């Protein structure tokens, strides 16, 4: 398997570090300096490799598959950021950061275990990255990439992923050093990793809340949970340092295992939300093995169990620390078990994706609630060192519990309701947690300020971390239910110029504007012949070439000619009511018995002309006409089986209003058009909506001899039912019509591969333009009134062509957030739609239609229509669907095309109906941000101060 | 006596922490209230826009109690004494309004302030003369709002009524003494007295009384001053201060039951300053009156009024404190004096929650 050259640099680095490590380890007696140097060069190469790797993204080297698949002609900041947008790329980044951490922490080490194990772990990550496709070669020659997922095209692509990789790399390094026995360095790395990981989780929350419009900051999505998991273990391990080195060391190693597991969860495609992660089986297996090995290594030390099982509570301080480790471990194990069960069930094919949102809440909340309560309630115990007496400790914790219980009781009887649409359990739990959390917050901040002898600044910053943790929990208590639950939304339509009032804020929709994005992308090369969407998208075009187009031309001629004689209008508008006597009638019954009867009377009521066939020539018009009508047949004998077909000869004259038709022949289907049977009432058989074929002559009308059968037949096909007539009308009068009438069909046909005989191998190459605008933007301008303060805010909805074509989600709709005090007014605007298509896509196509040929516009419409349907099904199903129902596929494509070419941006649904919004108030959300950022910031401060102190 | 271990938290530190925690908790409760999203198209929304206090009957066709109640409701008419009366029948169009106000049973009557805030909720029928009972309940609920309204209109009215009498200085003192008997402070004073007696630290009662008068006056004047300087801010805080004080009473009470001491009881000065401050929230209209008077009658009268009011309260506190400590000395002979005082505090806290 050939790799991109960047991959060889990585693999070379991995190889050297491994060789150096092995040699050094097994030649322990002589401790060769060369081996140490080789190992260092290996690690160094892995660091440098990242720079080369990132450079490939910056210069858009499309021979590297991830560049081709995840990047495009973006601005530099996004080209650089797409380095870690792919699954393999993020692993490669982690490998380099890991190597950096190891090199920095072990500058002077000669510890053989460290050298070997870091070589092993580093190469493992590089191998997994390779398997994940980080260095795959692009098999095609490309001039443009598929582009970065639109969801990721935001400045947020930097802080959250980078903080995550830094934390993961650092944790893995800490675990490696713990394994090797470099305890002090391992602890330092753990301390460094903690604020990064806390920050990463928080930034992920802010990202999803502010930008993605997921409604909240936490959805129990497996990928979110997988990042919480290492946090719980890492936090537990940091507390464990205060109790026992053995325990702390074990937990540090297990934290490393949880990072492997988190990578597994992210790459195993578990998450319905993080759809941008894709998987490779081998990767999952290797990560699974690494997880298990690290857990095993962590649990190897027997003294660990003694420490966990030792429940002797000597003094309040140790008790507090111990309870915190136990509660964090409890939460960590529960989280791990729940995630692992999802992974196993998904890999076994029992479920398709792990539970998220409301489903996951039902599992996670009740299981984690006791752990969080224990953690918070016991927090004040260890805030004052060993100085706190049992008496004071008991009184503080006890008072919090008593006050919590009283509040919970008041919540239970309905005296205090925090969340009116949430369960009683949620209300009761939140109320119970309030006083203990407030006390924990107050004690932590106070202890940081209190005058202690011999307590340094680093220790004080660690106390402050706990204060911010309390603040975070208070924020979650206030905002959690409102942000988690969908039931707090109110949906309302807001017409242009009118407002919605949410809380104390009045939000008025002032204006809107559609515009194109500036960049250009290639929507053909990366997809043609590869993307299922393009296969499906060429079905409507094939249909157009294979018959639709020509039939359409015929029908158009037919209309013209008939209209010129006034006959078409006469026939299409006609209503028939007649009573026809049939002297010689043949009746076929459902059991295939035929019967001949004299003297049947057929009554046609409210008949409607349906189809014209076979026009004759001069002098009078001979026609075959089908009418749909309610009919009743009198003179039949009631039978066990039902009559189905009536054939006979008549010479009745039917009055068509202004003219008369001489019917000479007749057959009638005696069952309703949609299926089923008619009903007998005495000797009269009544059928609703049946079909009757009449053959007759029409007085006074002549059809010119140049009308061929085909032309009228084409029209007849379209007039046959509402669906085909709709297809006709969607093309009628558009530029596509002119295109079909001139060069269009030949042009479209030439886009298919030659001599493909119309098998599936023809498909996949719809003539979509090679250079198209990146996307379109809808700007909604709101006027926000809070009391006397009026501000204007613009909300953007973005349509990204690449996203849509990748079948992910081309539409990115941000929420409108208005801060009120410590809370937010959160307003989401549903994208305005016409039928099933959102107007941004319609507008985009509308603009594209001005610049490209109707055939190209139609092709793009066809592909987009399929992409739109593809979003909820699997890739190959959409091809099957399009091929089994080509008419429907064509309908979708034409519908989108028609909407686009007739679209008027100034008269969109926003102007006529307004926008549909849903809004809610999320109280206390700023406490979550403050608490979270405070935790991370004081964590960083504690590390910096601690490092400085060590240096002194 | 509680002799703290070296470096252990002292009682006053713990109580300060509790006070902070209680206020933090009650603030969280106050911000976590149902959001109000007013849909401009519903009738109720229009009633609210008239700027009146509104009483709404939520009813459904299938409930017998509603059938019983509605004739009485309808005799009231659309408006009575400046209060708008309206009703919402349960149906597909109104489900959202029912859920917006969290109405789960019928009949429910809600009294809403002009800005749509729920002032009072009544579920079921009324006793006795139904029409009269409804009117009394609705009117009193509306006043609930006026008293706490930020605009201060209600305060000015109260103030003007008070000052229209020539005997207003005496009225002020009498009202001041009355403050002491309000449910906000009386149980706390009692508990403090009990605990003080139990700790046996109050020896010079006479001097204690004088200190108490002065310091509680200072406490009250402090809040008055706060109101004068930052009216809306203080009133905003006071709307959730009651829950905070209730929670604090519970925390402090539980703390005493669990073996802590109440350091405030050892000093009449500190404890009465504290009492003065917390009693302010029960007598907000009176304090607000001072502000109102300053605006209308002049600063000197306003200052005099506030001082007289505080003086009255101070006297009240001193009397109650004195009585409490005597009671406390009796209680001190009982083994669990602190615990009993603690239980009294917890109960007073629960009462303050409004159960």
Image: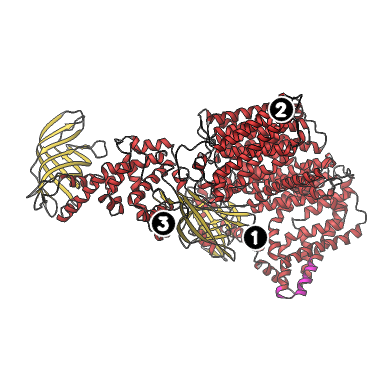
Which residue position holds label 3?
A909
Chain letter belonging to callout 2: A
Relative depth, front residue between B95 and A110? A110
Horizontal and vertical percent position of residue A541: 32, 43
Label pair 2/1, CB-CB below 8 angstroms: no
Horizontal and vertical percent position of residue A939: 72, 45
Q: CA distance from mark 2 to mark 1?
A: 82 Å
Horizontal and vertical percent position of residue A734: 30, 54
In magenta segment, residue B74: no
Q: Is residue B152 above or below residue A642?
A: below
Chain letter belonging to callout 3: A
Relative depth, front residue between B36 and A96? A96
Residue found at the very far right of the displayed protein: B203
Residue found at the very far front of the displayed protein: A34
Q: Is residue B286 above or below residue A628?
A: below
* Mark toward the viewer: 2 or 3: 2
For disc 2, the neighbor class at 10 Å (few under 14, some 14 to 19, many from 20) is many
Relative depth, front residue between A148 and A112? A112
Horizontal placement of B18 versus A862: left or right? Answer: right
Label pair 1/3, CB-CB below 8 angstroms: no
Chain letter belonging to callout 1: B
Magenta residues (range): B295-309
Q: Main secondary structure of the magenta part?
A: helix
Which residue position holds label 1?
B144
Which residue position holds label 2?
A24
> Which residue is found at the position 74% from the left and 55% from the top?
B183
Horizontal and vertical percent position of residue B46: 51, 62
């Amino acid at each position: 398997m050939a790799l991109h050259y960047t991959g060889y640099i990585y693999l070379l680095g991995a190889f050297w570090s491994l060789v150096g490590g092995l040699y050094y380890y097994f030649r322990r007696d002589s401790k060769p300096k060369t081996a140490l140097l080789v190992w260092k060069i290996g690690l160094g190469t892995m660091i440098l490799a990242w720079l080369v790797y990132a450079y490939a993204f910056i210069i858009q080297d499309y021979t590297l598959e991830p560049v081709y698949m995840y990047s495009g002609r973006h601005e530099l900041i996004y080209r650089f950021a797409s380095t870690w947008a792919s699954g393999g790329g993020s692993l490669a980044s982690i490998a380099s950061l890991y190597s950096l951490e190891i090199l920095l922490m072990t500058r002077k080490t000669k510890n053989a275990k460290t050298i070997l194990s870091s070589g092993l772990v580093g190469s493992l990550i590089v191998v997994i990255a390779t398997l994940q496709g980080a260095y795959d070669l692009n098999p095609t020659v490309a001039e443009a990439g598929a582009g970065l997922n639109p969801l990721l095209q935001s400045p947020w692509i930097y802080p959250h992923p980078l903080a995550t990789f830094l934390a993961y790399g650092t944790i893995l390094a800490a675990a490696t050093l713990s394994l090797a026995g470099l305890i002090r360095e391992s602890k330092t790395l753990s301390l460094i990793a903690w604020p990064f990981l806390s920050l990463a989780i928080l930034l992920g929350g802010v990202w999803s809340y502010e930008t993605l419009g997921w409604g909240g900051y936490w959805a129990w999505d497996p990928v979110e949970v997988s990042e919480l998991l290492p946090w719980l273990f890492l936090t537990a391990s940091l507390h464990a340092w205060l109790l026992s080195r053995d325990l702390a060391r074990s937990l540090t190693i297990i934290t490393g295992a949880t990072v492997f597991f988190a990578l597994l969860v992210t790459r195993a495609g578990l998450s319905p939300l993080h759809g941008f992660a894709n998987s490779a089986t081998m990767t999952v297996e290797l990560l699974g093995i690494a997880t298990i090995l690290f857990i095993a290594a962590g649990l190897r030390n027997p003294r660990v169990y003694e420490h966990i099982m030792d429940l002797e509570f000597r003094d309040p301080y140790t008790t507090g620390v111990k309870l915190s480790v136990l509660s964090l471990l409890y939460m960590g194990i529960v989280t791990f078990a729940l995630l692992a069960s999802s992974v196993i069930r998904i890999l076994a094919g029992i479920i398709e994706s792990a539970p998220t949102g409301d489903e996951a809440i039902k599992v996670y909340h009740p299981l984690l609630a006791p752990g969080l309560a224990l953690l918070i309630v016991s927090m004040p115990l260890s805030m004052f060192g060993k100085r706190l007496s049992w008496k004071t400790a008991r009184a503080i914790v006890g008072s919090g519990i008593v006050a919590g219980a009283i509040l919970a009781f008041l919540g239970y009887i309905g005296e205090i309701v925090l969340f009116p649409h949430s369960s009683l359990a949620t209300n009761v739990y939140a109320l119970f947690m309030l006083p203990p959390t407030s006390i924990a917050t107050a004690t932590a901040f106070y202890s940081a300020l209190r005058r202690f002898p011999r307590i340094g600044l680093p220790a004080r910053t660690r106390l402050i971390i706990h204060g911010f943790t309390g603040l975070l929990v208070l924020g979650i208590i206030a905002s959690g239910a409102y942000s988690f639950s969908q039931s707090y939304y109110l949906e309302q339509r807001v017409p242009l110029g009118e407002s919605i009032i949410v809380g104390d804020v009045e939000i008025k929709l002032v204006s809107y504007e559609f515009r194109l994005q500036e960049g250009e992308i290639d929507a053909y090369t990366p997809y043609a012949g590869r993307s299922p969407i393009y296969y499906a998208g060429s079905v409507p075009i094939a249909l157009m070439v294979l018959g639709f187009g020509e039939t359409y031309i015929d029908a158009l001629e037919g209309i013209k000619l008939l209209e010129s004689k006034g006959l078409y209008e006469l026939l299409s508008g006609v209503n028939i009511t007649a009573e026809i006597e049939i002297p010689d009638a043949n009746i076929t019954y459902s059991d295939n018995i035929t019967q001949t009867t004299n003297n049947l009377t057929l009554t046609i009521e409210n008949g409607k002309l349906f189809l014209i066939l076979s026009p004759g020539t001069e002098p009078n018009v001979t026609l075959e006409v089908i009418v749909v009508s309610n009919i009743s047949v009198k003179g039949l004998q009631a039978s066990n089986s039902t009559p189905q077909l009536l054939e006979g000869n008549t010479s009745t004259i039917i009055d068509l209003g202004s003219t008369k038709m001489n019917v000479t022949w007749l057959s009638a289907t005696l069952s309703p058009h949609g299926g089923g049977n008619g009903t007998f009432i005495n000797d009269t058989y009544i059928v609703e909506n049946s079909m009757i074929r009449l053959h007759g002559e029409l007085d006074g009308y002549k059809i010119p001899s140049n009308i061929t059968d085909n032309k009228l037949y084409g029209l007849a096909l379209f007039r046959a039912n509402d669906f085909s007539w709709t297809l006709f009308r969607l093309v009628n009068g558009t530029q596509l019509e002119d295109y079909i009438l001139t060069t269009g069909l030949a042009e479209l046909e030439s886009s298919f591969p030659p001599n493909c005989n119309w098998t599936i191998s023809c498909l996949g190459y719809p003539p979509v333009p090679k250079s198209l605008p990146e996307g379109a933007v809808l700007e909604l301008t709101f006027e926000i009134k809070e009391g006397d303060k009026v501000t204007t805010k613009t909300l953007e909805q973005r349509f990204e062509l690449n996203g849509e074509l990748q079948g992910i989600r081309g539409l990115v709709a941000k929420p409108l957030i208005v801060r009120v005090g410590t809370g937010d007014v959160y307003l989401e605007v549903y994208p305005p739609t016409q039928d099933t298509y959102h107007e941004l896509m319609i507008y985009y196509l509308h603009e594209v239609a001005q610049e490209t040929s109707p055939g190209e516009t139609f092709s793009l419409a066809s592909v987009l229509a399929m992409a739109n349907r593809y979003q909820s099904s699997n890739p190959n199903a959409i091809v099957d669907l399009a091929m089994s129902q080509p008419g429907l596929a064509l309908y979708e494509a034409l519908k989108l095309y028609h909407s686009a070419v007739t679209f008027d941006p100034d008269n969109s649904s926003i102007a006529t109906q307004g926008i549909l919004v849903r809004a809610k108030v999320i109280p206390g959300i700023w406490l979550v941000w403050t608490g979270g950022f405070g935790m991370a910031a004081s964590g960083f401060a504690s590390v910096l101060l601690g490092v400085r102190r060590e240096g002194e | 006596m509680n002799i703290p271990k070296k470096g252990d938290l002292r009682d006053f530190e713990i109580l300060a922490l509790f006070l902070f925690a209680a206020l933090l908790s009650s603030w969280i409760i106050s911000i976590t209230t149902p959001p109000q999203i007013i849909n401009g198209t519903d009738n109720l929304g229009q009633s609210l826009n008239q700027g009146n206090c509104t009483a709404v009957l939520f009813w459904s066709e299938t409930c017998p109690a509603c059938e019983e109640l509605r004739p009485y409701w309808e005799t009231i008419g659309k408006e009575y004494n400046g209060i708008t009366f309206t009703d919402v029948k349960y149906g597909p169009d109104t489900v959202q309004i029912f859920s917006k106000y969290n109405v789960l049973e019928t009949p429910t009557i809600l009294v809403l302030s002009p800005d749509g805030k729920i002032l009072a909720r009544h579920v079921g029928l009324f006793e006795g003369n139904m029409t009269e009972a409804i009117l009394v309940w609705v009117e009193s609920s509306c006043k609930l709002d006026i008293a706490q309204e930020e605009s201060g209109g209600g305060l000015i009215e109260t103030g003007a009524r008070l000052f229209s009498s020539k005997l207003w200085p005496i009225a002020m003192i009498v009202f001041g003494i009355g403050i002491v008997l309000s449910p906000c402070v009386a149980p706390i004073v009692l508990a403090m007295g009990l605990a003080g007696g139990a700790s046996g630290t109050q020896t010079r009662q006479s001097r204690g009384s004088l200190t108490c008068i002065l310091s509680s006056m200072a406490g009250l004047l402090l809040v008055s001053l706060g109101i004068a300087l930052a009216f809306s801010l203080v009133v905003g805080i006071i709307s959730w201060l009651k829950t905070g004080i209730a929670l604090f009473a519970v925390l402090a009470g539980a703390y005493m039951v669990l073996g802590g001491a109440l350091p405030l009881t050892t000093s009449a000065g500190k404890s009465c300053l504290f009492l003065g401050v917390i009693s302010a929230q029960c007598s907000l209209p009176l304090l607000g009156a001072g502000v109102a008077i300053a605006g209308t009658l002049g600063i000197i009268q306003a200052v005099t009024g506030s001082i007289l009011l505080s003086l009255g309260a101070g006297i009240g506190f001193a009397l109650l404190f004195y009585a409490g400590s005597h009671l406390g000395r009796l209680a001190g002979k009982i083994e669990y004096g602190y615990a009993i005082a603690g239980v009294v505090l917890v109960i007073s806290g629960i009462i303050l929650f409004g159960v």
